[in-house]
Amino acid sequence: MSKDHSEYDFERIEEKWQNVWAERKTFEVHEEPGKSKFYLLEMYPYPSGRVHMGHVRNYSIGDVIARFKTMTGWNVLHPIGWDALGMPAENAAIKHGIHPQTWTLDNIAHMKTQLKRMGFAYDWSREVNTCLPDYYKWNQWIFLKMYERGLAYRKKSWVNWCPDCRTVLANEQAAGGECWRCSAEVEPKKMDHWFLKITNYAEELLAGHAQLQKWPEHVLLMQRNWIGKSTGAYVDFEVPELGRPIRVFTTRIDTIYGATFLVLSPEHPDSHALIAGDREPELHAWITKTVAESRLKRDLSEVDKEGVDTGKTAVNPFTGENIPIWVANYVLMEYGTGAIMAVPAHDARDFEFAKKYGLAVREVITPEDETARPRNSGLFEDCGLVVNSGRFSGLPSAEAMDAMAEHAEAGRFGEKAVTYRLRDWGISRQRYWGTPIPILYCDKCGIVPVPYKDLPVQIPYNAEFTGEAGSPLEKIPDFVNATCPTCGGRARRETDTMDTFVDSSWYFFRYASPREETLPFVRGAADYWMPVDLYIGGVEHAILHLIYARFFTKVLRDLGLTALGEPFPHYLAQGMVTKDGSAMSKSKGNTVDPDEMIRNYGADALRLFILFAAPPEKEFAWNEDGIEGSSRFIGRVWQTVEDCREAPGPGPAAAAHDDAGFARLQKKMHQTIRKVTEDIGTRFHLNTAISAIMELTNVLRREAETLRGSAAGRELLGQAAERLVLLLAPFTPHLCEELWSRLGRTGLVYHAPWPFSDEALAQEEKATIVVEVNGKIRDRFEAEAGVTEAEMKATALALPRIQATLGGKPVRAIVCIKGKIVNIVT
RNA sequence: GGGCAGAUGGCGGAAUGGCAGACGCGCUAGGCUUAGGACCUAGUUCCUGAUGAGGGAGUGCGGGUUCGACUCCCGCUCUGCCCACCA
């Protein structure tokens, strides 16, 4: 074996190159109009305190692609920042008495050293920190622009209210109807909240999917469901006692002849008004109770359908018939109009309810083929021909829908309609550590936006974090008391802060010009860098964050700040990191500290391992053993490249070398370049790219001993070692920088051009042809790459083992795939 | 209840119509060593055969398409994720 080398000292070498990169500002980039740009972004972290394995995985994937793109000649923007506002900072303040700002900034400082220790190629000069006024100022600016355009508005909405703590509770804090802190019974309460009018963009958010072909299909589907478009019609049912109609929404107007009753949500404004008869008090009480319950129980899976008969009736505009009006807990106020026409024959929920309360069931749809009905449950089929429906009888459902909707429009008691499940985005939070909503309330002038020149409205430093009722901001007179910019009178400042999802809805624009002081971002810089060419992050953000970011981008476009409609044309949804069967989390106590892994094995080994263990989009189950393997592999690469580098000087030029070994290594080298290029660049299968590099290393090690004997062999060894270093550089950058410089190359491997794969040299000059009989492999033979089908067939048939298998049976057909396979069919 | 994704050795995974199990972990044997949990070499799906050559089975289960199926189609089972009374 070759000369022994001292072991690879990852600690010293990793630190060395991290310093070099920092000193030379290697990863800083600028707009270069002549050069193709590539904007690679990973979802920025919340500074919770320590980097976790999910981060390591996410950022390792991104880093490989960023470095690869740089080596293949792109001008790569690869920034990072901090999603630094949010509840954990406030909880830490309450629990440990640390100011949220101190806690957050300390965490950021620590996590920054951790990320640098991983060797990620970030342009740190563009670091964005959302808890600093120079960032959240622009949240406020955008909010005001939206307010001017009617896209931000104030509305009363239902919240969970704890009467003892006098505070609003999140749904999970009010689980089971009890306050998580004091166990008091939670009440529903209507409070003023600020909303962003995302529903204005519902249709465009849906239509935009056409531009998102490079998103995972299941993510688009989740967004589609979230937007929840349905096409149907509104229909007005006249209510004589009310003197006005009740409007319902239906997607199945073709079943309206089967509507045997109307159902209102308990929250419906007319529910109480319609109660009549001697059971009045009881019924009112039932409605009140159900309203209270429904907010909390809505999450729970199975709630029994329950309802009360109001005693009043409505007129079905199609039949002229009087049908009873009920109030029931299974109708949602938030969707449609909060009232439905019940068609028990063809809707499972209405059917269940009608059965429970003995209401009429009338079949109005019959299947086109008569075999399947009725279902044994008693429920009828719901598609086919319309029957028992006056002049519409006999029409197929789809046609009846059109005809009936037109009839309703003509009679002015209904209209075609499209509804969405998507709700406007409530952004008000009763919290301290968030962007203050830049609004003042003046006794005389009402709602007054804070003038742009007064931005940012800063989060006041001095606040008390007691964990008691209400937001800390309410209790700071200096913050709350203000003068009205319009009339100069006294005004009260809004004390709610914004949902932190606002911050993350546009931060990717900010990276283009992170220090800009007059606008959220500079148009020219954003025009150059945007859109994000590849966005990588956990699928848990697939709905909210990604839909809000798409919404904001469209708003920013309408404000004239960008021409872009979609920020992320390509999204790579990274799989979870799990251990012992569940996602790594502090609460489950199954976390693994990356620092410990770095200490024991180095950043390169950790990066390599986490990328090798599973393809990026799949779940990755952590196991301790594998990282040893990565570490060993790094040691072998070190040894191998050092051996090639120090191969003995030129011997006799004509010395013979092993031709077969030479060809094997040369072929492997070019095959590997091709595979790795494809795996990183188009498939993102980083795990198979690594395994290909491992195979090359194995071949290189196997052939080295003999190849070293000739000048040509030594030259090839040198080439292969160089290519190996280049291919591996995106994965284990420290190791490869060191080897690169030890190979005597000037400049950083980071800037070295990606190796070129010679197709001709990658080709097999000989192919193994598999011979099957009736689809079963019976033998194989070697053939020249250019072998013809006729030759293949002849050779296959002549093989003794094939002859034996055939046993003289007549051959019916021979299927032949050039260079691959011969299948003989008898 | 609806939707989506997945199921391959002891383990992570590879192969997307053409040699199943690449690559790695683990394990076994041997070598090297004062020793080693370091390193090197060989082996490692199951059954059968004799320890060989060989033969057979095999990618959750049952069918189908095809010369040929882990891969495509139909029907199930299980697991994970998302949504969940959305009219």
Image (spheres, coloured by chain):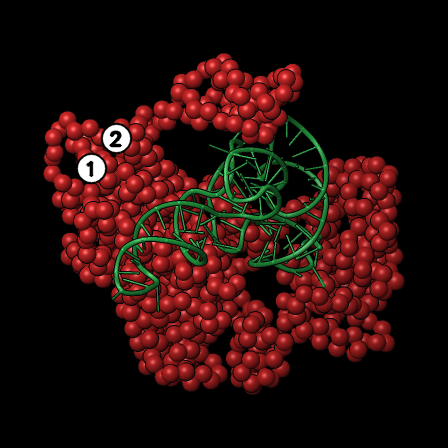
- Which chain letter matches label 1? A
Tell me if A684 is positioned left or right of A18 in this view.
right
Quadrant for residue A504, please give it: bottom left
Q: Position of residue A81 (x, y in %)?
A: 32, 60
Instruction: Please tell me how crowded label 2 is: few (under 14), some (14-19), or many (20+) other residues with Cα within 10 Å.
Output: some
Spatial distance from mark 1 to mark 2, Cα to Cα?
Answer: 10 Å
Tag 1 secondary structure: loop
In the rendered image, residue A780, in percent from the top left (x then y), is placed at 49, 27
Relative placement, left or right, of A54 versus A7 is right
What colour is chain A?
A: red
- Label 2 is placed on what type of residue? Asp
Mark 1 or mark 2, earlier in chain: 2
What chain is colored green? B
Q: Is residue B23 above or below residue B86?
A: above
| Residue at 13% from the left image edge and 44% from the top image edge | A744
Quarter of the image for residue A787 reads top left
Circles 1 and 2 on the same chain: yes
Residue designated by label 2: A658
Residue type, mark 1 in image: Arg
Q: Residue A169: x percent and y percent?
A: 54, 75
Q: Residue at x 56, y 23 (%)?
A: A802
Query: Which residue is under mark 1?
Result: A708
